Image: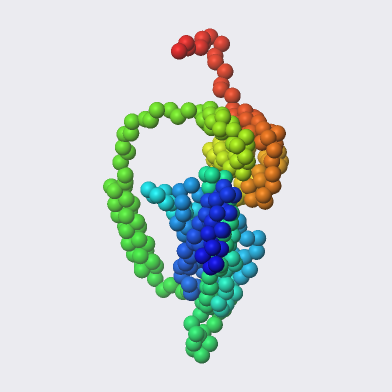
Amino acid sequence: MTLALPLCALLLAADAGSALPPPAPKARVDPARVKLGDPFVYELVFTHDKAQRFELRTPSDWGAFELLDQKRQRIDGSATATTTFRLQLSVFELGKQKLPDLTFEWVDDSGGTGQTTAPGLEVEAEGSLAADAEKKGEALYDIRGNEVVPVRSWRLVVALAAGLAAVALGYALYRYAKRPRKVKVKPAAPARPLGERTVAALDALRAEDLPGQGRVKEFHFRLSEIQRGFLGERYGFEALESTSDELLASLRRLRTPGLEVEELSRFVFEADLVKFAKATAGPDECKRAIEYAYRLVASTTAPPPPLPENASPQLP
């Protein structure tokens, strides 16, 4: 009976068309004991099937911690892949503090989705003064104002200034002698314009007809990645590794000619409902979604400059 239950669970997962969930990540804190306010690194490493992709659902409340930076790195091997999340944080409460539990969403090429939770580790925060500071009469004081220091002779000051100038000049000459030389590089063949590459990717996605195969969730994941890649390259920021909130916030800060951010916000919200909230989307909704992607590329792609009046187009 004990063996039958896991077997049934595996059969149900196979019938549902989703892959087995990935193993829990290996987590570590470096360092585990940190001074109050100093940064430290919280690293979580997934070793998983190459068909799976992960996204961190950033907590809205970090408690005693402050998130300073987050990065994601993926390395593909021959059979498996490794995805590493590196979060840089700081802590502002003394004593042992527990990091919040982190939830990761995952999806695979077969359309399977799920989530896994990494329990938070403990970080011990200590004060910046030594333990016996109070006994030694040490304490934290306000910054003192400038004080006038009498100088009996300027000879020492002039000699020090001349010595520092000589050292600075010598260092500048050393850096100049060690400067990197320009290397002549053969120019690479010009890449296809961004708009053409994006339209080609949309054409390939539409030709697969994923909604017609019942793979609506995978369709929205693929469509979102095509749009994110286009927006990131078009407006010059990291879009593929951003959360939905970070993506929209970046676009609102940037100059984005031709882009209706509110219309994009509605698309992102509806796509997230399908990807993460188990909402359903029919063929008409999928058709409208990819048509919006085509319009997005067309409205934000700058037209080529006009030819001079006395110039004639070159024939191929």
Please determine whether, in this image, residue 60 is positioned above or below residue 175: below
Please determine whether, in this image, residue 158 is positioned above or below residue 275: below
Which residue sits furthest front?
A: 1
The image quadrant that residue 191 belongs to is: top left
Give me the residue at 51% from left, 12% from top: 313
Indicate left or right for 153 with 254 as reference: left
Q: Is residue 206 visible?
A: yes
Colour style of the rendered protein structure: rainbow
Percent across and percent down for residue 145 are 56, 72
Give me the residue at 47% from left, 64% from top: 26
Q: Tell me the quadrant of the picture where the N terminus can be found.
A: bottom right
Indicate left or right for 40 with 77 as reference: right
Percent across and percent down for residue 123 are 52, 73
Percent across and percent down for residue 293 are 63, 34
Give me the residue at 52% from left, 76% from top: 124
Residue closest to the eye, 158 or 260: 260
Residue closest to the eye, 275 or 20: 20
Which residue sits furthest bottom?
A: 135
Residue closest to the eye, 166 or 206: 206
Q: Tell me the quadrant of the picture where the C terminus can be found.
A: top left
Give me the residue at 59% from left, 74% from top: 93
The image quadrant that residue 114 belongs to is: bottom right
Percent across and percent down for residue 91 are 56, 70
Q: Is residue 220 visible?
A: no
Number of marks in picture: 0
